[in-house]
Image: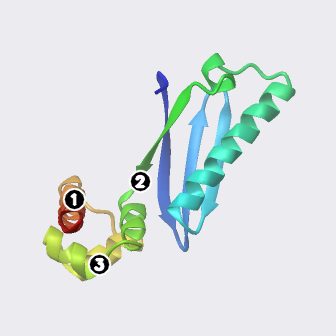
Amino acid sequence: MADHKLKIDVSWTGNNFCCAWNDEDAGTVVATAKTLAKLKYDFEESLKWHIEGCVADGDKLPEYLVNGEYDLVYELDTAALLRDAETYTTMAAISRASGINQKQLSHYANGIKQPRPMQRARIIAGLQVIGTQILALC
């Protein structure tokens, strides 16, 4: 595990996952994909390519970037979280587990509305309940 953690903000935009990372010294890297797994792969490749290009151009970058001594930490907004969860469960199941109306969850998943922090916590707790129940089956 590296000492430096790069926070990657992930959101749902229309029909795709989108992520971005910005650093004052290194610049900005952006990626988009249909699935979260593909997004992570594409972002990692884009970041490596960006760093290689900066080094080739003689740009000064922090050593931890040049040496690959960093971990990527993906932070999903609520829409991205729900869209990714849809690959494993349904909105109806998330609604039952979280106690949040299914239509309201749909508004969050489509980016129409943004949940308050307490609502987001309920969604995450509901997803954890679903995960625990699935693990209990194994």
Residue 78 placed where, x, y %?
35, 60
Label 3 packing within 10 angstroms: few (<14), some (14-19), many (20+): many
Residue 122 percent coordinates (x, y): 18, 60
Residue 29 in view, yes or no: yes
Q: Residue at x 64, y 19 (%)?
A: 62
Farthest residue, direction right:
57
> Does residue 21 appear to the left or right of 108 in the view shown?
right
Residue displayed at 17% across by 55% down:
118
Q: Position of residue 76 (x, y in %)?
A: 41, 54
Q: Residue furthest front?
A: 138
The quadrant holding residue 95 is bottom left
Q: Amino acid at mark 3?
A: Met
Q: Residues within 10 Å of mark 2 (few under 14, many from 20)?
A: some
Q: Amino acid at mark 1?
A: Gln
Circle 3 sits on which residue? 91
**The residue tagged with tag 2: helix, strand or loop?**
strand
Instruction: Identify the residue under disc 1.
Output: 128
Q: Residues within 10 Å of mark 1 (few under 14, many from 20)?
A: some
Q: Nearer the viewer, mark 2 or mark 1?
A: 1
Which of pointers 2 and 1 lies earlier in the amino acid sequence? 2
Instruction: Tell me: 91 left or right of 51.
Output: left
Q: Residue 96's quadrant in the figure?
A: bottom left
